[in-house]
Amino acid sequence: MRIAIEAQRIFRPNKHGMDFFALEMIRHLEKLDDGNEYFVITAPGQDCHCLEESPNLSIVEVKCPSYPLWEQIALPLAVKRLGIDLLHCTSNTAPLNCPVPLVLTLHDIIYMEPKVGRSMSLYQEMGRYYRKLVVPRILKNCKKVVTVSQFECNRIRGVMKLPEQQITSIYNGYNPRFREIQEIDMNVVGEYTPRPDFLFFLGNTDPKKNTACTLKAYSIYLQKSRIKRPMLIADLKEEYLYEILKKENIYHIKPYLSYPGYIDTNDMPMLYNAAFAFLYPSLRESFGIPILEAMACGTPVVTSNTSAIPEIAGDSDLLVDPTNPEAIADAILRLEEDDAFRDRQVAHGLNRVRSFSWAKTAEAYSRIYAEIQKEMQYP
């Protein structure tokens, strides 16, 4: 079967969650001997060497001035031109008029829910409105809708009124380069923060990342801690950080913060290993790949007791109310003050990640493709 996989943004240098999902899934589909011929349709970008062609995988670059035009016009035209049998769209949306059977990976429907907070990014706002417009209209055309956790599967089925057999969940994985590293390379760490054993936080302008509450929790931690570990914040612009510090009246914590912006994904394993703890107290997640990455590096994860996070993090003692900065601070302090407790959390994480891999993800998608092929042959 000739299968096209939409991966519009995998060649951009500053990748995020859905980009990594598409890239890793494609890499592992490529390794399968499932008889399919895969065509990855993407936009041109600087990181064009992150994926290589092979006998069963071709890369098709399609140019277009904007994402909506790329997806709604250029993508269907490319599918027709290539003689595709099945299209898999990997990032929540798809063409309204798809010329072939469609599989959709619908990571979440956060954009269909009441908005929490205010985003500082026009790009995020436009994306939210685009998804809100497109997703309800394409679901009826999907042969299969796939999401990334059972929590999100139940949520989508209920909100979007989908038949039970139309939607399923397939877990994400994590890249095996996220592993324990015995010797910390301070040449890498020093590019981002002055010393190891810091608190590591992935924050951005998306309200669900809970940046303001996390920084308030860090302020409380600094008041109570004898050690006062610094915090490394990834993917947060300086002007947005300053606005939060001013609004929350916690500007005094600024000397303890490092905020280099986007961090090269190649440096992330070393930074996870160098961190004392990883903070991921999101308000809403459909999965949370960074949880697995940090756990695989032997770093305890302070995360939320909401949405899909407990499903992914497992029976952790570091699940907290993300709206309670005192609870977040107390979890950090417990790790700091109780070595045996921290050791148990490290062991829990290393054991938990064994349940997840991109190979399992790719195999599950390959089975879905085969089921649809059978339906097409014997309707």
Image (cartoon, rainbow, N blue to C red):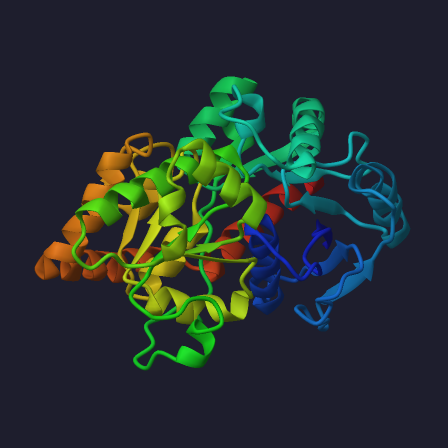
In the displayed structure image, the side of residue 51 where residue 237 appears, left or right: left
Looking at the figure, which quarter contains the C terminus? Answer: top right
175 on left or right of 261 = left
The residue nearer to you, when weighing 367 against 261, is 261
Q: Nearer the viewer, residue 145 or 339?
A: 339
Residue 310 drawn above or below residue 226: above
From the viewer's perspective, is 275 left or right of 134? left
Place residue 227 in its image quadrant.
Answer: bottom left
In depth, the one of 159 and 360 nearer the eye is 159
Q: Would residue 366 be found to the left or right of residue 351 on screen? A: right
Evaluate whether residue 176 shows in this view: no
Image spot of residue 175 (x, y percent): 47, 65
State which quarter of the image contains the N terminus. Answer: bottom right
Instruction: Specify whether residue 260 is in view.
Output: yes
Residue for point 66% across, 24% down = 132
Position above or below: 4 against 135: below
